[in-house]
Image (cartoon, rainbow, N blue to C red):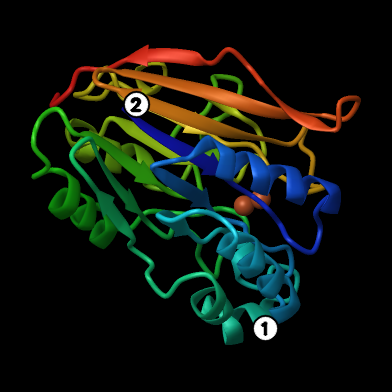
């Protein structure tokens, strides 16, 4: 069994400071095999915000895998976005924009879908599709293959295609047989489901899981949340922890369970 804590959209600089300690303690207590961050560590991409994000990350247990989001480049100042790009992300978070983690049970690849333009949306390039093919397609059957991006490949049905990563549909047509789970953020909602409900792909058991915004004040109709994902053979359980203001604590849901076809 492998336990993955999935955090997203921390947005340091526009976050609820009282949630930070609770989150840090819960992640540590969960004793994850891996902690995944799907981008938007900061709000304005200033050095001070990245310093806060780094301090938070450094207090958590290894190993970790992270990808940048559209806010990890300066968001509100386009000339600065062009000049700075991901320089501070590389300096304070990680210089690796295609992080990879693998053990006997899971293989996890992260990709950067944030671009200079558009400032909100993201895309996957042909080169990145080849990267997934090279890293995840050779993984032997039985090992669960996970792709992490900031922008989602799939969402619950009420979200239209405009909310999805650009070129994602074409990418999935090529990659679905090499993937079991898609992890993403950006929408600030926690949700999971089957990709087959939206797209016809060669792998009908492919699962998507969205983490909400763990600590930020950028609410999009939901409370702060994060996910704890347990992978046990052919089963994946995605348990969402949502902030309960009355209890001043994150409360766990029962979780959604999906079965997938290993090595499909
Ligand atoms: Fe975000
Ligand atoms: Fe985002």
Sequence-wise first label, 1 or 2: 1
Task: State which quarter of the image contains the C terminus.
Answer: top left
Would residue 190 appear left or right of 122 to someone viewing this image? Answer: right
Would residue 174 appear left or right of 192 to someone viewing this image? Answer: left
Task: State which quarter of the image contains the N terminus.
Answer: top left
Q: Which of 5 and 219 is in front in this view?
A: 5
State the count of labels.
2
Q: Residues within 10 Å of mark 1 (few under 14, many from 20)?
A: few
Instruction: Name the residue at 52% across, 28% down.
Output: 155
Would residue 33 appear left or right of 136 to someone viewing this image? Answer: right
User: Is the shortest distance between ligand 1 and the CB of mark 2 under 8 Å?
Assistant: no
| Residue 193 visible somewhere in the drawing | no
Whole-number angstrom distance, CA of label 1 to CA of label 2: 43 Å
Instruction: Name the residue at 43% across, 37% down.
Output: 4
Instruction: Check disc 2 and report the residue beneath it.
Output: 231
Q: Could you say whether the residue bearing mark 2 is in a helix, strand or loop?
A: strand
| Residue 224 visible somewhere in the drawing | yes
Residue 15 numbered mark, or none: none
Q: Where is residue 201 in the image (x, y as percent from the top left)?
A: 25, 25
């Amino acid at each position: 069994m492998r336990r993955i804590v999935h955090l997203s959209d921390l947005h340091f600089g526009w976050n609820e400071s009282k949630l930070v300690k609770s989150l840090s303690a819960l992640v540590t207590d969960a004793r994850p095999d891996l902690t995944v961050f799907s981008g938007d560590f900061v709000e304005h991409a200033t050095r001070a915000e990245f310093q806060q994000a780094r301090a938070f990350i450094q207090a958590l247990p290894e190993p970790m895998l992270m990808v940048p989001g559209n806010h990890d480049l300066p968001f509100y100042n386009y000339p600065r976005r062009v000049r700075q790009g991901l320089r501070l992300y590389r300096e304070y978070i990680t210089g690796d924009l295609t992080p990879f983690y693998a053990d006997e049970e899971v293989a996890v690849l992260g990709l950067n879908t944030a671009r200079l333009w558009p400032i909100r949306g993201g895309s996957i390039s042909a080169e990145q599709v080849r990267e997934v093919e090279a890293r995840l397609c050779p993984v032997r059957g039985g090992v669960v293959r996970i792709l992490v991006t900031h922008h989602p490949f799939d969402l619950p049905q009420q979200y239209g295609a405009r909310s999805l990563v650009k070129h994602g549909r074409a990418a999935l047509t090529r990659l679905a047989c090499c993937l079991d789970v898609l992890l993403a953020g950006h929408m600030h909602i926690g949700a999971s489901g089957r990709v087959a409900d939206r797209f016809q792909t060669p792998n009908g058991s492919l699962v998507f899981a969205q983490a909400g915004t763990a600590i930020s004040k950028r609410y999009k109709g939901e409370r702060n949340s994060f996910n704890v994902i347990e992978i046990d053979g052919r089963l994946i359980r995605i348990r969402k922890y949502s902030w309960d203001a009355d209890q001043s604590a994150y409360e766990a849901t029962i979780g959604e369970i999906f079965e997938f076809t290993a090595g499909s």
